[in-house]
Amino acid sequence: MSNTVKDQYFLWQFSPEDEAKIRYQEFGQNNPEKTPLLFIHGYGAMIEHWDLNIPEFAHKHKIYAMDLIGFGKSEKPNVRYCLELFAAQIETFMFLKKLDKVIIVGHSMGAASGVYLAHHKPEKVEALILVNPSGLFGDMMDGMTNVFFGLVASPIIGEMLLAAFSNPIAVGQSLMPTYFNQSKVDEKLANQFTLPLQDKGSQWSYLSPSKRPLDFRLDHITKPCNYKGPVFLVWGAEDTALPPQKIIPEFQQLLPQAGAFIISKASHCVHHDAHEEFNNRLEKILELIQPA
């Protein structure tokens, strides 16, 4: 993304006792004929993970992107991280920027946060574009995975593992399975994902999904959910963590109106992994939502 785009911050008081500084960026010009886009990154990521996507759309759309609390350059307080907290952050940001509605483009955990908001505040969401969303996993957790998460949830072991992984080499290795085109996992990407891990408080946010996995799931939401607007699922065909043939039907129970698009030769981070194909698909989706 252009180096001329500056980081902006707002102070979010999300409880009587707690507040955090949140980073966001703005792109493009206000367009009264088009609903603004709000890009929400996935677990462990940040605004920069959209750097091959946002510039392609900023000439036509007003775009916002922000780091979720606990990730990227946003502050990382010791609080209970969950989809409800992230959805509240999105709603607060919309209030701050005086946005009646947005089109949410969310990846993985960011997509699940968008679904949570759309279910509880459907009037705030013009459309959902869910990129390899998490939140519904079926029986994907095998025995060894559950054992691993049990270890990570242990405060001492979890923090030791986090410290061991907080370097570019280990981060790059952990990113490899989320990419089909593994040449994309270069030094720049590894460094982007490593820096937030070294921030004060990163253990609270990064270990939360393993310590309290139910806080990051959508299973408890009524099926179908309250949101009845346009929904589009965009999935990397080679996502082994959340295989589309298994997870898409679950999301279509939650959101029966959802159309699904599969991008070949791409894995979990499809928007970055196969950015040209993803951008072409996103452009077609936006034309369906708001025809010229």
Image (tube, rainbow, N blue to C red):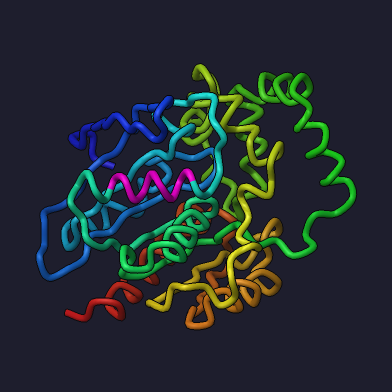
Up/down of 189 relative to 53, above or below: above
Q: Residue furthest front?
A: 16
Q: Residue at x 74, y 23 (%)?
A: 155
- Rendered location of residue 116, percent (x, y): 49, 59
Quadrant containing the C terminus in the rendered view: bottom left
| In the image: residue 174, left or right of residue 99 | right
| In the image: residue 167, left or right of residue 85 | right
Between 31 and 170, the one lying in front of the other is 31
Numbered label tally: 0
Q: Residue at x 21, y 81 (%)?
A: 291
Up/down of 157 relative to 239, above or below: above
- Rendered location of residue 61, percent (x, y): 19, 61
Q: Residue at x 57, y 61 (%)?
A: 266
Q: Residue furthest right?
A: 143
Quadrant containing the N terminus in the rendered view: top left
Up/down of 13 relative to 231, above or below: above
Residues in magenta?
A: 85-93
Q: Is residue 142 magenta?
A: no
Q: Quadrant of residue 265?
A: bottom right
- Rendered location of residue 219, percent (x, y): 65, 63
- Rendered location of residue 20, percent (x, y): 38, 27
Q: Residue at x 44, y 62 (%)?
A: 120
Q: Main secondary structure of the magenta part?
A: helix
Q: Quadrant of residue 67?
A: top left
